Every structure is written in structure tokens, then in C-alpha cells.
Image (spheres, rainbow, N blue to C red):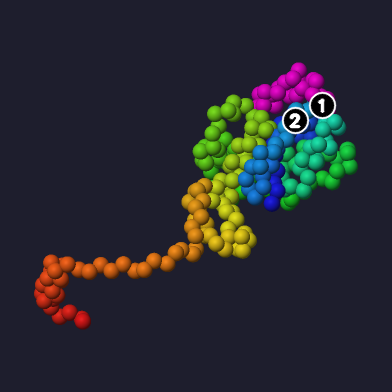
Amino acid sequence: MREIVLDTETTGMDPEDGHRIIEIGCVELFNHLPTGRTYHQYINPEREVEAGAIAVHGIKNEFLADKPVFAEIVGEFMDFIGDGTMVIHNAEFDIKFINAEIKPFGYKPYKLTEVIDTLLMARKKFPGSPANLDALCRRFNVDLSARELHGALLDAQLLADVYLELQGGRQHGLGLSGDEKKHSSSQENIQGDVRMNIPKSRPYREPREFVPSAEELEAHAKMVSGLKDSIW
């Protein structure tokens, strides 16, 4: 199963007010584990970034001036998403922006029901507890030392770790239902990330005899003679 953990940074809070995406970060997962493939792009929004947004992500207008506009990257971005299911924290925010950006190019808008929202997962799993990304990283001991400000790729990488923990951690979906014929000569014993192949067939050995000594026989006879009301 292919999934794309995604995060965006924007010029403001609402695309209906003309705000745009300025950064996209994606991490590819396969069966809930990172493949090593990522997508990262800064984008010239062709408008000013609001001061409140800069305070969150630190991305300034001058930095974005020479970056490609969305029309130049929409194809490669959509190709990276492909048929993967998007995993987003607070999906309503990002999907609203993504749909606004891809609409002019004829792409089908995404529905929230097609996206995995880790914010909703966290609220269901830990009702009443803080469910922002920082709080979840602290809950699951995910290293936050590199996160001074929001950044799309960094946040997507952190979210990939959080999503794995929300799924049950690294023991989730170990895939033990593989081809039985392939593993007919061995049995997997899994402890953490260590896999040991234990052969099912072992060489026959004659049973060993352990003859008791005279002292052991004498001690046994003495013990038996002292038993009262035994059942044998």
C-alpha cells in the first residue's frame, strides 16, 4: 500500500482570500514505512506572504522571488502523488489549498474522505489531549531538535514517524502472511527488528540415558518411605 505523507506552507490561512502554497514536502511510505523517496519544492506564490505566516514558517518574499511558480511544478507534484493515499495532519487545511492550486490545470479535486487525517486519528486515540504535531512528537519521543520553525518537508518527515506510531508502532503490520511455500523450511521468530530463521526439521538424536547413582537411589527410597497417605 502506497501512501504520501504531505505538508504545505502557505502565504496565509485561506485560498478563498487569494492565499497560495509556497512550500510542499512529501514523504513516500509503502506498507506504512518510508521508502526513502521524497518530494520537496518551494514555490513563488506571485503575491506577498503575510507577516503572520512568516512568523510561523520563516519563509520570506525575497527568498521565494526566484522560485518556480505553481504552473511549472504542478505536473511533477501530481506525478509524485500518483495513486498514493495522502496522509496529512489537519487535512482540511492542506486539501483546501491543494485543490485551489490544481483546479486551473484541470485536475480532479481531492475529497477529504480520500485522505488520512492524522489529527482526527490522534483525537480519537487520545481524546482530550493536545493533538498538534509538536505534542504528538513529544508523546511518541520523536526527535524535535531540528524544528525551530515549521517546514513542509521536515514536518512531513516528523508526521511520517507520528503516523507510524498512531498505527501501532514498528510492530504494526509485520506481513507474516507471505508465501508459505517460500518459508516452508523455516519459521520466523521476530523480536523487535531482529529476525531469526529457525529450521523446522532438525536431525534426529538418540535419547540419552541418565542412570541414577547409588546415593541418589538411597535418598529417593528414604523420601518415599517417609510419605504418608500418598496417592500412588
Which residue type does callout 2 highlight? Gln
Decide if residue 60 is on the left or right side of residue 218.
right
Q: Position of residue 82 (x, y in %)?
A: 78, 45
Decide if residue 196 is on the left or right side of residue 81.
left
Residue visible at 85% across and 31% down in the picture: 72
Q: Which region of the structure is painted magenta?
A: 45-69
Whether residues under marks 2 and 1 lie with C-beta atoms below 8 angstroms apart, the answer is yes
Residue visible at 63% across and 36% down in the picture: 157
Res. 107 in view? yes
Q: Which mark is residue 83?
A: none
**Residue 132: in magenta span:** no
Residue visible at 59% across and 54% down in the picture: 173
Mark pair 2, 1: CA separation: 9 Å
Please, what secondary structure does the residue beneath circle 1 have? loop
Please, what secondary structure does the residue beneath circle 2 have? strand
Residue assigned mark 1: 68
Residue assigned mark 2: 41
